[in-house]
Image: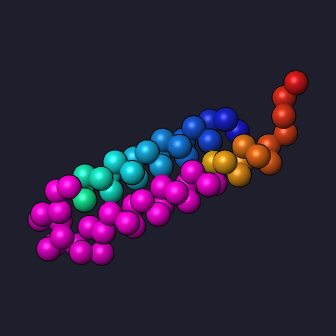
Amino acid sequence: MRGLVNALVMLAVLGFVVGLVLRTTAGDLMSARPELADPVFYWRGAIVLLALALLILLISPKRK
């Protein structure tokens, strides 16, 4: 279960980085695929992935 949480956090970090890169260098992609060039799309997805990882941690049984 810990591996799934780590994978979700890594995907969230990737989403934040992609959103940051798109925000700072909105160039050719904006004209080619405007629906994928919105950085808020990636940031919202990253927040959802972090919330899912937190939920998994909260509901998983504790090891002793």
Q: Quadrant of residue 5?
A: top right
Where does the magenta region start and end?
A: 24-52
Quadrant placement of the C terminus: top right
Name which residue lies at 25% across and 59% down: 23
Name which residue lies at 22% across and 72% down: 33
Q: Position of residue 62 (x, y in %)?
A: 84, 34
Instruction: Please state if 64 lies on the left or on the right of 33 as rendered.
Output: right
Outermost residue to the left: 28
Name which residue lies at 72% across and 43% down: 57
Outermost residue to the top: 64
Q: Position of residue 49 (x, y in %)?
A: 55, 54
Outermost residue to the front: 24
Instruction: Please state if 50 lies on the left or on the right of 30 as rendered.
Output: right
Q: Quadrant of residue 19?
A: bottom left
Q: How is the image coloured?
A: rainbow
Task: Give the overall secondary structure of the magenta segment.
Answer: helix
Residue 47 on the magenta segment: yes
Name which residue lies at 43% across and 45% down: 13
Quadrant placement of the N terminus: top right
Instruction: Please state if 19 lies on the left or on the right of 57 as rendered.
Output: left
Depth check, front residue: 41 or 3: 41
Depth check, front residue: 36 or 21: 21
Marks counted in the figure total 0
Residue 40 on the magenta segment: yes
